[in-house]
Amino acid sequence: MKEKTGFSINGYLVLAVLLVVAAITVVPLGQLTDTLPILSLVFLGLEAGALAGFMKVQPNQAKVMTLFGAYVGTVKKNGLRWTIPFFNRRTVSLRIRNFESGKIKVNDNQGNPIEIATIVVWSVSDSAEAVFEVDDYESFVNIQSESALRNMASSYPYDPQEEDAIALRSHPQTISETLKQEIQDRLDRAGVTVHEARISHLAYAPEIASAMLQRQQASAIVAARTRIVEGAVGMVEMALDKLQEKDVVELDEERKAAMVSNLLVVLCGDKHTQPVINAGSLY
């Protein structure tokens, strides 16, 4: 069921017409013996019934109208409107809303239990679908958003296993776009448009958080040490080349090995080294 425009006219114009008709029909009421006052009473009754057709439509609001169970249209024009009094009207908000899910526990695609939550920004785009296709579109948005979040979280690892792999923690923009599309696919039938979906909470479950923190720290230490060693080797190589280029001192292979060892200890050590001054000869 798709949205269509329902019948409505300017309420102020209708109100002015009803006031004029009421002023005309009230005059003959004093002559109760004539037929004209009876017609005046009939017109006044019709005018009183017409008052039920007035409705107020606020900005970003829609009135979904039905007649004896049949959908007859939606009114979105703002202000005082008038429609057929027999129409049953239901108000639907078209304003943008926020929904924040609770923290849910789910396993990522590596089997690690994680806690995750999301914030979804959405609005109703088709009032007819929102009212007639689902029983309660607000509850439908909440449940389907959490279902999409659970499905998305189980499709990616928490941390990247490879250099270019997409992960929940390392690619927030990509994950947000994927989650938005996942939710939108589920909410299309309810006439809802998802404007934004992003992760608001992401962490390992408490039972493995300590172990995973140690693993992350170990990975960071290994990565840092690897870079330090690469830089230290380059510095040692540069030092030996400079000494040989400028003919500062000649070193045999054994002395070069000792110098390399000492430089690597100084450059790669995690604590400051204590210098030792050799007061003897060169050899």
Image: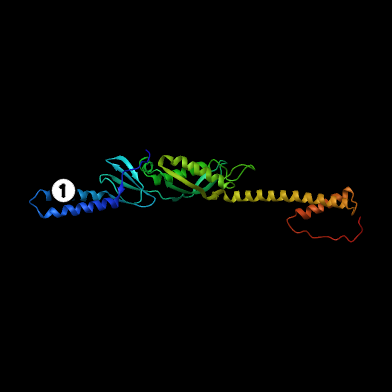
Percent coordinates x, y for residue 19 in the rendering: 22, 54
Residue at far left of view: 33
From this viewpoint, is residue 258 visible?
no
Question: Label 1 sits on what residue type?
Answer: Val
Percent coordinates x, y for residue 188 in the rendering: 43, 40
Q: Nearer the viewer, residue 114 or 63?
A: 63
Percent coordinates x, y for residue 107 in the rendering: 53, 43
Q: Nearer the viewer, residue 190 or 82?
A: 82
Q: Residue at x 22, y 49 (%)?
A: 49
Q: Secondary structure at mark 1?
A: helix
Q: Residue at x 11, y 55 (%)?
A: 30
Left or right for 155, reference 91: right
Picture quarter with the N terminus: top left
Left or right for 153, reference 260: left
Which residue matches tag 1?
42
Q: Residue at x 73, y 51 (%)?
A: 228
Q: Residue at x 66, y 48 (%)?
A: 219
Q: Nearer the viewer, residue 136 or 95?
A: 95
